[in-house]
């Protein structure tokens, strides 16, 4: 009975975390990673287990978003090309560096994303012309590389960075930016990060099925809501999740410093 209750609990956590993430464009680690730590996993094992399971978020969201046929394959490939090297590099070094200050800094930046979006009422509600020129493209993809590094290392909330960056720099509305984030970050970035981490540290494989099933369902439902309700709801969800993720990261980092 204890094992069944544990699996049900993991499933519920995964559905909630990944449903919110699919709606807001990131932030699954807000609930899922701390929950794995609370259940007794070491940080490295919890991180690897979360990464492996979070790939299913991308799968669930992909099934829903791919039906809309609104994504540009060339742009999608450019996001992958810019971010994947950073993901692999970040996942390769995270287990050997201190994380407290990195989490605090990431928390402050993540919270600032939500505040910035909230103070910009029209941001991401309509599609704008993307920035042109070699320098603009280098900046745009350079930042995606840096976010990829954070995704491979810190893991929590970095999809939110991609979502806002696609809105601010590349001119997408929130709904379409979330679609790119969930498919490319959730499926491919997290997939490569999961492989690199799994090769370096143990994964709690007996927990993965419940987490994966929850991520598949949560990812699909969250993606459906983002499509059905449009960018205004997605923007509100993004702002709420970014502030919660940011404050959670700051608290976690300060706690680790104090310990």
Image (spheres, rainbow, N blue to C red):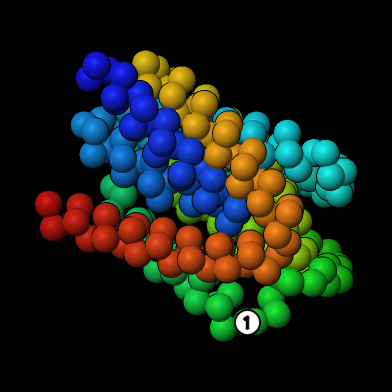
Q: Residue at x 29, y 24 (%)?
A: 5
Q: Nearer the viewer, residue 90 or 63?
A: 63
Looking at the image, residue 187 sits to the left or right of residue 250; the answer is right
**Residue reaching furthest to the front:** 1
Q: Between residues 165 and 115, which one lies in front from this camera angle?
A: 115
| Rendered position, 136 above or below 27 | below
Tag 1 secondary structure: loop
Instruction: Return the residue found at the far left.
Output: 259
Residue at x 58% of width, y 31% of height? 216
Which part of the image, by quadrant, shows the N terminus? top left
Q: Which residue is mark 1?
A: 120
Q: Is residue 227 left or right of residue 34?
A: right
Horizontal side of 57 relative to 136 (left or right) equals left
Please indicate, yes or no, whether residue 191 appears anywhere in the rendered image. yes
Crowding around mark 1 (Cα neighbors within 10 Å: few <14, some 14 to 19, many 20+) is few
Q: Position of residue 143 (x, y in %)?
A: 63, 59
Toward which corner of the image does residue 172 lie, by quadrant? Answer: bottom right
Quadrant housing residue 133? bottom right
Of residues 51 and 28, the one nearer the viewer is 28
Q: Residue at x 35, y 24 (%)?
A: 7
Q: In the figure, is residue 11 to the left or right of 60?
A: left
């Amino acid at each position: 009975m204890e094992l069944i209750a544990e699996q049900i609990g993991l499933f519920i956590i995964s559905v909630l975390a990944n449903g919110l993430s699919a709606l807001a464009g990131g932030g699954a680690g807000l609930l899922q990673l701390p929950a794995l730590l609370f259940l007794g996993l070491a940080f490295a094992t919890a991180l690897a287990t979360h990464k492996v399971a979070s790939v299913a978020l991308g799968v669930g969201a992909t099934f829903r978003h791919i039906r809309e046929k609104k994504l540009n394959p060339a742009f999608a490939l450019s996001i992958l090309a810019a971010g994947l090297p950073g993901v692999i590099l970040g996942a390769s070094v995270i287990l050997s560096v201190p994380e407290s200050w990195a989490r605090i800094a990431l928390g402050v930046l993540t919270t600032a994303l939500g505040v910035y979006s909230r103070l910009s009422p029209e941001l991401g509600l309509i599609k704008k012309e993307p920035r042109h020129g070699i320098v603009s493209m280098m900046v745009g993809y350079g930042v995606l590389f840096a976010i990829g590094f954070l995704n491979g290392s810190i893991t929590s909330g970095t999809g939110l960075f991609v979502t806002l960056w696609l809105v601010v720099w590349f001119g997408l509305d929130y709904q379409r930016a979330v679609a790119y984030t969930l498919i490319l970050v959730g499926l491919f970035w997290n997939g490569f990060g999961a492989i690199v981490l799994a090769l370096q540290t143990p994964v709690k494989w007996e927990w993965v099925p419940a987490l994966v099933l929850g991520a598949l369902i949560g990812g699909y439902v969250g993606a459906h809501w983002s499509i059905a309700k449009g960018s205004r709801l997605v923007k509100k969800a993004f702002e709420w999740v970014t502030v919660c993720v940011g404050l959670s990261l700051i608290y976690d980092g300060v706690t680790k410093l104090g310990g």
